[in-house]
Image: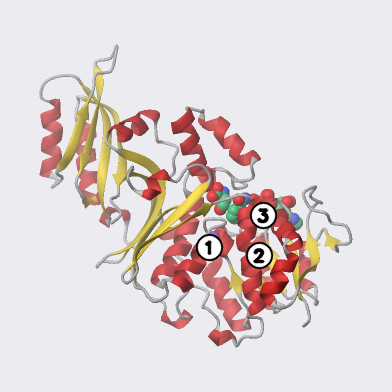
Amino acid sequence: MKPVKVGICGLGTVGSGSFNILRNNAEEITRRVGRSIVIEQVGARRDNDMCDLTGVNVTRDIFDVVANPEIDIVMELIGGTTIAKDLVLQAIENGKHVVTANKALIAEHGNEIFAKAQEKGVMVAFEAAVAGGIPIIKTIREGLSANRIDWLAGIINGTGNFIMTEMSEKNRPFSDVLAEAQALGYAEADPTFDVEGIDAAHKLTILASIAFGIPLQFEKTYTEGISKITAEDVGFAKDLGYSIKHLGIARRTDQGIELRVHPTLISKKQLLANVNGVMNAVMVKGDAVGPTLTYGAGAGGLPTGSSVIADVIDVARTLTADPDNRVPHLAFQANSLSDLPVLPVEEIESGYFLNMSIEDKAGVLANITQILSKNGISIESLIQREREGSDLVPLVVMTHIVKERNMNAAITEIEALSDISGKVQRIRVEHLA
Ligand SMILES: NC(=O)C1=CN([C@@H]2O[C@H](COP(=O)(O)OP(=O)(O)OC[C@H]3O[C@@H](n4cnc5c(N)ncnc54)[C@H](O)[C@@H]3O)[C@@H](O)[C@H]2O)C=CC1
Ligand SMILES: N[C@@H](CC=O)C(=O)O
Ligand code: NA
């Protein structure tokens, strides 16, 4: 059989990892596909020392790749949402299948891209876009397709988890760990995407769409990063039996879909609480299967390349299939997507960990508990400690589950008390059962 011909656009961390996997595992891949997959052309601004480009047709203009009539599959590995969007739309227009690792592109422009791909009868595959090397898209879209998915929750940013782990286990400064994550190729081109939760929000947007059959709605995803978490928060959480993890959570409720990314306290007994470093893990709860957990490297050239090339293989195997019989891009048939609303964050329900600095005098604690009770919030546990050399002492309150709106009202009232210094630190708590 004729070989399948691919064109690689972008030869950075993921591009070079994918290039080397295709080269090094060529024989295994041919045995799996039934024909070989060859690199017809590479579009790169510059060569990459990690790749032996001897004999490879290299162009400095990535649009040469999408125009190349020999190429069946275009791999978009440049990142960003401007040139990458033009490139992918042009590839589709030219009848090429596309494999991408670009979560920002899929989360923000996927609805348009998939509509165009459907019109043209081509596939756009994006396993590498969520949780790097973990086959989570395939797991939800195919492995769990018999289930009504109730919720999913995951550690879906490797850089953030690496930073949190190194800071809490080795007391390393934030900026050092971030610099190391960048050197290792884990971070986004703009690392605030990792640190402020934007990258995780892109990924959660995609996961929620394929789990619940809703259009991609990145702009409605509630997003908080890890930058405001202090060593004191981590210490108190530990004393209470919890770890703080940056989670993406998507949950179906009677009112709609909760879609949120934020630091979260989870019991140390949860498997997720023990996912450290660059590793990612996603729990998915289906009505038939119950809870499942998928775990693996969330970033890095070879792990991410593993997902990119798995997609290339999938596309190569189904090149000749009738487009109507392929797995739909968003797991559900495009004309069967649901208009379930994404809930505003005030409507979500959660437990809360509150950490505040209060004056060490009679009556303050009573005022705080009264405000909480007035807003329908019941306390699960409470820690008050001395702080050496200060009249202000930390007070930590853990609450039972309550609506975010009630918690907002209580925090506003507490912050207005004269015996409270500064803001109340609020971290949500999840029990994931
Ligand atoms: N690094 C990682 O672990 C992961 C990255 N991703 C995604 O994969 C994509 C690529 O990321 P990385 O490989 O980390 O980035 P990178 O910055 O290492 O590589 C991107 C490459 O594309 C090239 N490039 C950009 N614009 C170009 C243009 N117009 N013409 C030619 N070359 C161009 C750059 O020169 C660079 O070599 C991004 O969408 C990223 O979000 C997804 C999962 C994991
Ligand atoms: N910057 C991302 C890369 C993979 O998606 C991360 O750290 O998870
Ligand atoms: Na993946």
Element type at marker 1? loop
Q: CA distance from mark 3 to mark 1?
A: 16 Å
Residue 272 position within the rendered picture, expressed as x and y whole percent measured from the top left: 39, 49
User: Residue at 55% of width from left, 86% of height from top?
Assistant: 324
Q: Are marks 3 and 2 in contact (CB under 8 Å)?
A: no
Q: Is residue 162 left or right of residue 81?
A: left
Query: Closer to the N terminus: mark 3 or mark 1?
Result: 3
Could you classify mark 1 by the number of other residues whose Cα lies within 10 Å: few (under 14), some (14-19), or many (20 or more)? some
Q: Nearer the viewer, residue 15 or 373?
A: 15
- 23 above or below 270? below
State the residue position of label 1.
135
Check disc 2 and report the residue beneath it: 309
Instruction: Determine if the C-beta at disc 1 is less than 8 A from ligand 3.
Output: yes
Residue ID at (59%, 77%): 116
Q: Left or right: where does residue 425 sit relative to residue 50? A: left
Q: Residue at x 22, y 45 (%)?
A: 407
Percent x, y of residue 109: 55, 66
- Between label 3 and label 2, give the one nearer the viewer: 2
Q: Position of residue 100 (x, y in %)?
A: 63, 64
> Which residue is rendered at x = 70% and y = 56% of the image?
15
